[in-house]
């Protein structure tokens, strides 16, 4: 016990000036991390009012959100290179300034490609600021760099901020205007800049490492591929899929971009994603699983919105009440994952099974509860299960990913993981559910509409306008219920496959190396490459 304590250096944050008390230094960075996670180019809770005041469609605004997430996902391999090149104060001030400018510009831009670019840059600044804060307090959270502690606590910040940001954006939109959320985030970034300017100083823990050997063109190609795929599935229903020449041309562009990405990966010395990164055992199953999980959870953004908005006719301030049980589920899921992985050190695969069970409870609960006769409070339990499952699976998948990868390729794999986790899984799932509604709604109207003709032909008195007013929401309700049922079947099938394959990746997590060892490893890899050349 004493020997272990002697090998662990005391936690310190030397980038702070001496007048800042030691005890509050980590909490300042926690606060700054929350402000970064609250930010975004545009905000989900304000979409309805934005559509009413601007000429933008829902698909246009959703593409802004996907561009923001794509910026976050593509930036992961650059995080440590930036950390070893610039001081912590420079990176945080730069990220806060970027978020500030993007939030001030976004409400006034009407040219869509420019708006998407602003949201993309904002996502890069957002993840840079969050990473700098959380990486500097990692040893405060877990002195042994134990990721079974770090990832559950990290997801409290990330997923908790998602729910709280939606609540705040909706409240500001309802009481004031939709662009007040951008003003609020701009004010928060100004507070961050003031705190950083007064309380921190430029400090280096290690020698400066130059930004050579980064495949900038490869990063642009992969980002372009990700945005092209997001555009295809986001606008697919609006363009009527491949009946449109636009999407046929885009599909060819996606294929060409993909070939360029793969070709560059095998031909340049330091590609953005190295070929060896794809060869790790269990990597592909984890990527497939997180994509499927995101597709299941995309029901929140399609089926839930259709049911609450079109069937129940709830206003924004009513539907946002569901964020509270979702937030409770996120907190419970993160703490449960911490207890399972760190305290009890149980099997990781069985924790994934628990998370899938939470998704099944959410999907089946919605299937049985969706009705025009329920109160919104009856949806609290399924929404809690959704938040619980999302937190458990996010923390577990990321922990498993760190376990199976060497640190050299971990952040590259993390970038691919988040491309699927934050963008592709959700947009593909949303496209499938939207297409399902486009099939089932006319089909149900045709099937059940025959009853109107039979009643009318029978000479029975019938108020057609009144009947139609209730008939269409009922058809929407039935269609939503059907798609929830099919999605629940698919999730149960995946759950049963996991029960058959009940084997852990590993019960003990390997230790993450120190920042100095990471820098030496990166520098050594470039030295080896130069020697071979």
Image: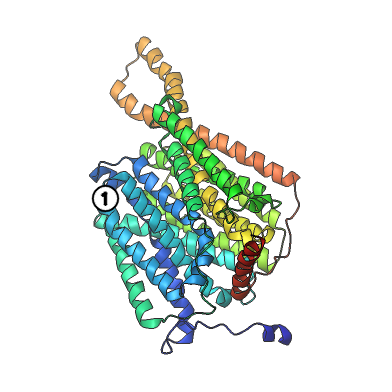
Quadrant position of the C terminus in the picture: bottom right
Classify 10 Å Cα crowding around label 1: few (below 14), some (14-19), many (20 and above).
few
Q: Give x and y (percent) for residue 59.
A: 37, 40
Q: Work out whether 430 lies above or below 349.
A: above
Q: Work out whether 142 lies above or below 49.
A: below
Is residue 505 shown to the viewer in this render? Answer: yes
Farthest residue to the bottom: give it.
19
Q: Give x and y (percent) for residue 101.
A: 31, 62
Is 240 left or right of 283, judged from the image as shown? left
Which residue is depicted at the point 35% across and 63% down? 98
Is 331 left or right of 33, judged from the image as shown? right
Depth check: give the residue in front, 195 or 452.
195
Q: Find numbered disc 1 in the image and state the secondary structure of the residue it sits on.
A: loop
Quadrant position of the N terminus in the picture: bottom right
Q: Work out whether 136 lies above or below 279.
A: below
Across the whole image, how many numbered discs are drawn on residues?
1
Farthest residue to the front: give it.
533
Is 420 left or right of 129, judged from the image as shown? right
Depth check: give the residue in front, 472 or 138.
138
Which residue is depicted at the point 58% across and 64% down? 151
Q: Give x and y (percent) for residue 483.
A: 51, 34
Residue on which disc 1 sits: 109
Please, which colouring scheme is shown?
rainbow
Which residue is depicted at the point 33% across and 76% down? 194
Is residue 371 shown to the viewer in this render? Answer: no
Q: Give x and y (percent) for residue 247.
A: 43, 31
């Amino acid at each position: 016990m004493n020997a272990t304590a002697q090998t662990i250096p005391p936690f310190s944050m030397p980038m702070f000036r001496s007048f800042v008390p030691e005890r509050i230094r980590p909490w300042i960075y926690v606060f700054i991390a929350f402000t970064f996670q609250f930010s975004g180019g545009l905000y989900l809770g304000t979409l309805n009012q934005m559509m009413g005041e601007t000429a933008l469609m829902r698909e246009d605004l959703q593409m802004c959100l996907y561009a923001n997430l794509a910026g976050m996902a593509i930036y992961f391999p650059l995080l440590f290179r930036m950390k070893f090149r610039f001081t912590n104060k420079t990176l945080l001030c730069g990220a806060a300034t970027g978020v500030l400018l993007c939030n001030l510009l976004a409400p006034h831009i009407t040219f869509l490609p420019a708006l998407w670019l602003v949201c993309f840059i904002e996502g890069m600044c957002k993840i840079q600021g969050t990473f700098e804060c959380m990486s500097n307090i990692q040893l405060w959270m877990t002195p042994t760099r134990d990721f079974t502690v770090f990832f559950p606590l990290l997801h409290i910040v990330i997923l908790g901020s998602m729910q709280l940001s939606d609540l705040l954006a909706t409240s500001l939109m309802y009481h004031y205007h939709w662009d007040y959320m951008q003003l609020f985030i701009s004010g928060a970034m100004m507070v961050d800049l003031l705190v950083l300017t007064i309380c921190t100083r430029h400090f280096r823990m290690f020698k400066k490492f130059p930004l050579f050997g980064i495949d900038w063109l490869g990063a642009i190609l992969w980002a372009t591929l990700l945005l092209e795929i997001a555009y295809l599935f986001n606008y697919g229903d609006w363009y009527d899929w491949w009946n449109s020449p636009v999407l046929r041309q885009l599909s060819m562009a996606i294929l060409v971009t993909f070939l360029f990405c793969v070709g560059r990966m095998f031909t340049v010395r330091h590609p953005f994603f190295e070929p060896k990164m794809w060869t790790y055992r269990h990597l592909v199953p984890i990527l497939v699983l997180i994509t499927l999980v995101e597709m299941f959870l995309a029901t929140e953004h399609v089926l839930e919105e259709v049911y609450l908005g079109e069937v129940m006719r709830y206003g924004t301030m009513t539907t946002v009440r569901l964020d509270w049980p979702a937030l409770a589920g996120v907190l419970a899921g993160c703490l449960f994952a911490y207890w399972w992985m760190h305290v009890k050190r149980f099997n990781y695969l069985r924790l994934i099974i628990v998370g899938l069970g939470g998704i099944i409870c959410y999907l089946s609960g919605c299937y049985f509860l969706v009705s025009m006769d329920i109160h919104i409070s009856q949806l609290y339990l399924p929404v809690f299960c959704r938040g619980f499952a999302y937190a458990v699976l996010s923390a577990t998948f990321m922990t498993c990913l760190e376990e199976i990868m060497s640190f050299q390729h971990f952040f590259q794999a993390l970038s691919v993981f988040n491309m699927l986790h934050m963008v592709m899984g959700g947009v593909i799932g949303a496209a499938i559910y939207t297409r399902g509604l486009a099939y089932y709604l006319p089909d149900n109207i045709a099937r059940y509409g025959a009853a109107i003709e039979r009643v009318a032909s029978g000479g029975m008195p019938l108020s057609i306008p009144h009947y139609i007013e209730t008939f269409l929401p009922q058809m929407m309700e039935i269609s939503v219920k059907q798609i929830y049922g099919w999605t629940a079947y698919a999730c149960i099938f995946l759950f049963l496959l996991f029960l058959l394959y009940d084997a852990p990746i590993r019960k003990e997590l390997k230790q993450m190396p120190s920042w100095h060892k990471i820098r030496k490893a990166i520098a050594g890899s470039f030295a080896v490459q130069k020697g071979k050349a």
